[in-house]
Image: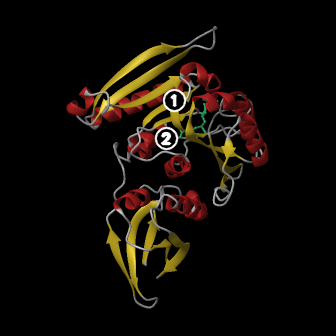
Amino acid sequence: MQKYLLLRNPGHNRVYYLESEKLALAELTLTARRFEQPCHHIESIDLAGINYLAFTVEQILSERELTWVSNLSFVLALFKHSGDEDHPTLQPVELTPRSYVDPKISMLLKYSGKTNEIFTRLMINVGLISSDFQFDDPVQMLDPVSGKGTTLFEGAIRGFDVTGIEMERKLVHETTIFFKRFLEQEKYKHDLLKNAMYASSAGSEAFIQLFEYARNKQDFKSESSRKHLAIIAGNAIHSRRYFKAEKFHLIIGDLPYGIAHGNVSQKKHNSRTRSPAELMETSLPEFQKILKTGGSLVLAWNTFVWPREDFVELLTKTGFQVLAAEPYDQFTHRVDQSIKRDIVVARKD
Ligand SMILES: C[S@@+](CC[C@H](N)C(=O)[O-])C[C@H]1O[C@@H](n2cnc3c(N)ncnc32)[C@H](O)[C@@H]1O
């Protein structure tokens, strides 16, 4: 038997860290389902005043298992534990995370309404684990409410091809400028194409900013090693118009909170104050079509403005299989006075 201890990243957001222990345990429990061997005693423990998450496996982690552990959203360090209770010994294990793009990308920007990047990483992990797909698959991920791109950047870190839809043109513009500068500064070979997309009537026009990029010239030459990050200035309710059926392995997003962020006026009924229920009623049937069979959808929302049962009922009615058994019921957490956030995880079978 080999016991491992994980140290959690204190992150940049203290409130999230304090609330996130049970989320981390739930994510670890799901991750262990991808191990090739049984995993026991997943628990939170204190050692010399420091909190760790612990788990025990029969043999040391395989390369593949270590990759899953290294990609956990919260992981800062991993140790092999030996010795007894009075004389424990911790041996550091080098992590092997997948990172095509430097993970600092999603930490650089700070703005009101940003989704915490560690939480975003958790949603992506939970989505991937709950789907039929692996890290090595050529994953296509959509964030239909992409804001200033945290999900897109977290997907790019993993080496996924990512697409966002955002209705606020200013946010699309700012995200495009930011990513272009990042690619230039980090010396990625890249191209940016801007194209109009499907429009049937005035007011429903959309356009796409498509980045093609690679770490070097050689990779850029071949379509198979080139990466893609696209942002559509459009509306999630028209998703089906933008994409072919069964395009995406994952759909991940942090829905509008139904409250105003920052200096956006409370009275103004714009995208940031819109109820997630209203948006989901029109968008879920579209998401169902563009998600691959075996793919999964993970959406975060404010349970104060829309009860979980109603969201689950709508998903089920639309044809999704909602994953509700433990630990999927462990993700609720308080963000602030007006937001109690939860995630819903559903599959297309
Ligand atoms: C909670 S924010 C997402 C924040 C994002 N994860 C980030 O970290 O930047 C939700 C976003 O959804 C956008 N939105 C709301 N309704 C939308 C719709 N129908 N189609 C596309 N985007 C929409 C809002 O403008 C807002 O930027």
Q: In which quarter of the image is the N terminus?
A: bottom left
Disc assigned to residue 336 = none
In the rendered image, residue 210, in percent from the top left (x then y), is placed at 41, 24
Asked if ligand 1 lies within 8 A of label 1, the reply is: no
Asked if ligand 1 lies within 8 A of label 2, the reply is: yes
Tell me, yes or no, whether the two marked residues, 2 and 1, touch with CB atoms within 8 Å. no
Q: Earlier in the sequence, mark 2 or mark 1?
A: 2
- Structural distance between the alpha carbons of marks 2 and 1: 21 Å
Dividing the picture into quarters, in which one does residue 234 lie?
top right
State the residue at coordinates (39%, 82%).
82
Position of residue 35 relative to residue 235, above or below, is: below
Position of residue 239 relative to residue 329, above or below, is: above
Position of residue 109 relative to residue 19, above or below, is: above
Q: Quarter for ligand 1?
A: top right
What residue sits right under mark 2 in the picture?
150
Q: Can I make out residue 275 in this image?
A: no
State the residue at coordinates (62%, 40%).
349
Q: Can I make out residue 83 in this image?
A: yes
In the rendered image, residue 31, in percent from the top left (x then y), is placed at 50, 58
Q: Which amino acid does label 2 sit on?
A: Thr
Q: Say which element carries label 2.
A: helix
Mark 2 crowd level (few <14, some 14–19, many ≥20, 10 Å Cα): many
What residue sits right under mark 1 in the picture?
247
In the rendered image, residue 322, in percent from the top left (x then y), is placed at 68, 46
Judge by depth and name the residue closer to the eye, 62 or 161. 62
Judge by depth and name the residue closer to the eye, 170 or 199. 199
Q: Say which element carries label 1.
A: loop
Q: Which of marks 2 and 1 is in front?
A: 1
Dividing the picture into quarters, in which one does residue 241 lie?
top right
Mark 1 crowd level (few <14, some 14–19, many ≥20, 10 Å Cα): some
In the rendered image, residue 38, in percent from the top left (x then y), is placed at 50, 68
